[in-house]
Amino acid sequence: MASMDTAPAAPAIPARRARRTPIFGSRRNLERALPWMVVIGIFLFWEVTVRVFSIPDFILPSPTAIWESYLRWQPAILDNAGQTLFTTVFGFAIAIVFGLALGVAIGSSTLVYNGLYPILIGFNAIPKVAVVPILIIWFGIGTVPAVITAFLISFFPIVVNVATGIATVEPELRDVLRALGAKSRDIVLKVGLPRAMPYFFASLKVAITVAFVGSILAETIGSNKGIGKLMVVASSRFDTPLVFAGLLVTAFMGVAMYVIANWFETRMTGWATRGMTQNQQAGM
């Protein structure tokens, strides 16, 4: 018979957790390090491939050749990158204002939806490369066509996502709110608009990246300054490392703007992803 003063046995550690010894300390640290690991791996593979197969720089420059070109032309690259960033952010800001307003109107009114949505879809289907020459004829070569192109190409995702977030408010919830005395305007502003915020910020992360496409597209067709103009000049001289340097600088700016949009999304709509975060932590 066992003695009464025997200490209770310690609870067994689940085998799943006992076997898990994460290298980075936690899942969150691994998630933070993984993007850098992938990027470094891609550049290493790129460098090794170019050197092993002796690919000429004018066909595919190595990352080291691109870095050397960036250092050589750094003042010109940064000057043109500043112009591209300005036109992109300006056009993107205009798209946010008009896209949010029109998205609210379309999502809250069936009449506005039926009247404007087909036009928006048709206009979005038009290749923006065909619109840029018209903008140059109207406004001349310079900043304005690039701003308008960035606006046009980033406007549609914002409208669609905001309209979807507002239009998908449950009919039962609308009926209950109306029974409690809420007006349609109150339902849109106090229920529909907060519900559309996750959709809105998701559209921002898409729109800011495509806005750079619009700016550079306009700069390659008709502009005196910008990354697009820089790449056209570099291509005419077969300076492929400089072209790639412009592309990588643009990619860096796009990632930076994406991170900023994601930061605002986390601060303003953290409640929308709280459950998913808790589930991920529970699975660690």
Image (cartoon, grey):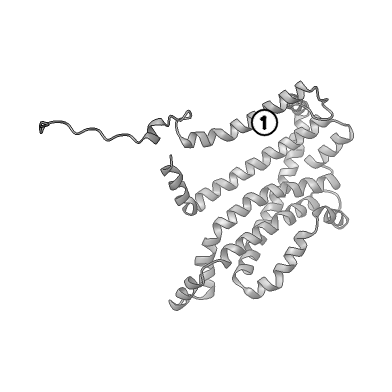
Q: Nearer the viewer, residue 88 or 240?
A: 240
Residue 70 on image: x %, y %:
75, 29
Q: Nearer the viewer, residue 274 or 76?
A: 274
Residue 135 on image: x %, y %:
84, 56
Left or right of 187: which side holds 117? right
Residue drawn at 59 percent across, 35 percent down: 35
Instruction: Say which residue label 1 marks.
Output: 42
Q: Nearer the viewer, residue 279 or 137?
A: 279
User: How busy is the neighbourhood of tag 1: few (under 14 within 10 Å), some, or many (20 plus)?
Assistant: few
Instruction: Indicate the amino acid at tag 1.
Output: Ile
The secondary structure type at the circle numbered 1 is helix
Identify the image quadrant of the N terminus. Answer: top left
Residue drawn at 85 percent across, 34 percent down: 234
Residue drawn at 68 percent across, 73 percent down: 114
Identify the image quadrant of the C terminus. Answer: top left
Left or right of 63: which side holds 141? right
Does any portion of residue 226 appear in the rendered image? no
Residue 57, above or below 261: above
Residue 89 on image: x %, y %:
69, 48
Does any portion of residue 170 appear in the rendered image? yes
